[in-house]
Amino acid sequence: MADRSEEEQLDVAKRWWKENGTSLIAGAVLAAAGVFGWNAWQNYQQGQSEAASVRYQQLVSIATANELDEQQTAGARELIAELTDDYGKTLYADLARLLDARISVQQDDLDAAREALEQVADDSSHRYVQSLAWLRLARIEVESDNPDAALELLDEPISDSLAAQQADVRGDAYAALGQTDQARSAWQDAMALAQEQDQTLYGVQFKLDDLGAEEATQ
């Protein structure tokens, strides 16, 4: 991975976010419901400003598109600013920052994505959302040729419900370091955890297959 151009690194990061971003953001809302309990979650939603809820739904409808034009990007940024400025301590603001990072990756701005994710990782009181930020920061570090930094991030107390994704990214970091055995073990763990938790984990089997193919040619 050390020979990858910046453009190639961004392409890989974009592809990972396209495959995982929307489903994980949706999972953040579902996880919050599970943590608070359904009745408590309904009360929580009702306690938030109706305007914040509407703004967030508008943001989701824009930001989860595969590609954004200039007008859509400007509209999304305006909504993100409103949510984070006016509702900065709420779950809406945390999720808005995750979408902010996703848009930044689409716009080839990994530094801005890092900044948004670090704010969630540092400030969020919602462990699942915080865990998403750590995972995505680790992914960015792998694609930026900083796998050691990625492994440090993956040692954070990431939510058990994201253990499969954690193992997947850990495998990518080990692969970037050339540590084949550790990469294989991590990806196998990811597959087992995904099956145990009845989750769909894209691409891991392909990485294991490629690892075997590479060994066969040595």
Image (spheres, helix red, strand yellow):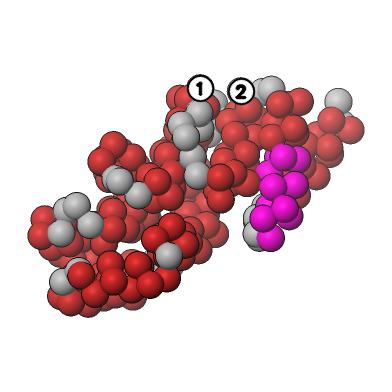
Q: Are the two marked residues, 2 and 1, in contact with CB atoms closer than 8 angstroms?
A: yes
- Where's residue 123, x and y in %? 25, 41
Task: Report the disc number at residue 87.
Answer: none
Q: Which residue does the image show at 89% across and 33% down from the upper left?
A: 216
- Where's residue 138, x and y in %? 47, 36
Residue closer to the observer: 128 or 115: 128
- Where's residue 28, x and y in %? 43, 59
Q: Which residue does the image show at 19% across and 52% down from the upper left?
A: 89
Q: Is residue 14 left or right of residue 130?
A: right
Pick whichever of labels 2 and 1 is earlier in the sequence. 1
Q: Which residue does the image show at 59% across and 34% down from the upper left?
A: 170
74 versus 161 height, above or below: below
Residue 190 shown in magenta: yes
Residue type pointed to by label 2: Leu
- Give the total number of marks visible in the rendering: 2
Q: Which residue is mark 1?
A: 148
Residue closer to the observer: 48 or 211: 48
Identity of the residue furthest to the left in this view:
86
Residue type pointed to by label 1: Asp
- Where's residue 31, x and y in %? 46, 59
24 versus 175 height, above or below: below
Q: Residues within 10 Å of mark 1 (few under 14, many from 20)?
A: some
Q: Which residue does the image show at 42% across and 70% down from the upper left?
A: 38
Element on which disc 1 rests: helix
Q: Residues within 10 Å of mark 2 (few under 14, many from 20)?
A: some
Q: Is residue 42 left or right of residue 149?
A: left
Label 2 – label 1 distance at C-alpha: 8 Å
Residue 101 shown in magenta: no
The N terminus lies in which quarter of the figure? top right
Q: Which residues are magenta?
A: 187-198
Dominant SS type (magenta): helix
Q: Which residue is mark 2?
A: 177
